[in-house]
Image (spheres, grey):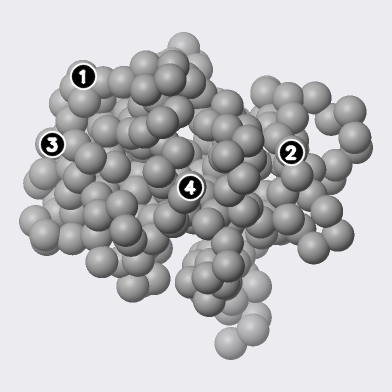
């Protein structure tokens, strides 16, 4: 299983609130967001971890280059206009015949749920995409995900006109036809991940939703506290269970 991390954003909202480092270097309980993702992916049988950062993120570049020497980590340095374009650049370095799990650097989730999510995707060969969704809405512009009774995705919407309970969690497992659409989308001028997801449905790519109990996006300083409390709850549940 290959993993990809989009860490090329500027983190402008955090910067305006006083955070001086690139967003992937936000720490939760002493561990940077980027390091947490790498650790989680490594524990979930990563064959390769592909990361894209922007050309201005010198401190992040120094951290990654100085911390990880394994061939498991493949780093691309390129500034892009959107997350979709970042994904497009990453795919140039990945075997597109393989399966890929993509996420942005600011997604915070329960590792146990993530492990089950990966297992479900690898076992279900009938789909080309398994999209993480959540009912936890704490986003300024959520992407609503409409599903049928079997959690097959039927639509992606900017407004919740059909009263769906799910929004996109920003984690995408993709293979086959879904990966082929990335190049087509970018070269046809598509410029946002949500529009790419709509194009997947237009191309009859079979997508299913996989519900997570909660996924936190770290966009503001207050989100750091929310994410740390969330991870603390997960750790306490693990300790209690064992």
Q: Quick one: label 2, few (<14), some, or many (20+) residues within 10 Å?
A: some
Between 177 and 39, the one lying in front of the other is 177
Residue at mark 2 = 155
Residue 145: horizontal and vertical position, in percent?
73, 41
Sequence-wise, the earlier of marks 1 and 4 is 1
**Alpha-carbon span between mark 3 and mark 4:** 33 Å
Residue at mark 4 = 178
Determine whether the residue tagged by mark 3 lies in a helix, strand or loop: helix
Name the mark nearer the viewer: 2 or 3: 2
Residue at mark 3 = 62
Mark 4 vs 2: CB contact within 8 A: no
Give the residue furthest to the front: 203
Q: How many marks?
A: 4
Name the mark nearer the viewer: 3 or 1: 1
Q: Residue at x 49, y 55 (%)?
A: 173
Q: Quick one: label 1, few (<14), some, or many (20+) residues within 10 Å?
A: some
Residue at mark 1 = 56
């Amino acid at each position: 299983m290959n993993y990809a991390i989009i860490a090329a954003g500027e983190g402008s909202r955090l910067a305006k609130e006083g955070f001086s480092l690139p967003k992937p270097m936000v720490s939760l309980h002493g561990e940077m967001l980027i390091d947490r993702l790498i650790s989680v992916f490594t524990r979930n049988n990563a064959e390769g971890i592909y990361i894209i950062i922007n050309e201005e993120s010198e401190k992040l570049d120094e951290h990654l280059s100085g911390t990880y020497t394994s061939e498991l980590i493949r780093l691309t340095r390129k500034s892009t206009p959107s997350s979709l374009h970042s994904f497009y650049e990453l795919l140039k370095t990945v075997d597109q015949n393989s399966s890929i799990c993509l996420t942005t650097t600011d997604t915070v989730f329960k590792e146990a749920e993530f492990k089950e999510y990966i297992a479900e995707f690898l076992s279900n060969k009938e789909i080309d995409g398994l999209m993480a969704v959540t009912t936890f809405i704490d986003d300024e512009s959520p992407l609503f995900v409409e599903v049928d009774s079997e959690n097959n995705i039927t639509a992606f919407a900017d407004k919740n006109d059909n009263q769906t309970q799910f929004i996109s969690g920003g984690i995408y497992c993709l293979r086959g036809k879904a990966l082929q659409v990335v190049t087509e989308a970018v070269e046809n001028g598509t410029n946002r991940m949500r529009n790419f997801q709509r194009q997947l449905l237009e191309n009859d790519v079979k997508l299913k939703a996989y519900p997570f109990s909660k996924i936190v996006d770290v966009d503001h300083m207050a989100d750091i506290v929310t994410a740390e409390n969330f991870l603390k709850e997960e750790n306490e549940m693990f300790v209690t269970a064992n």
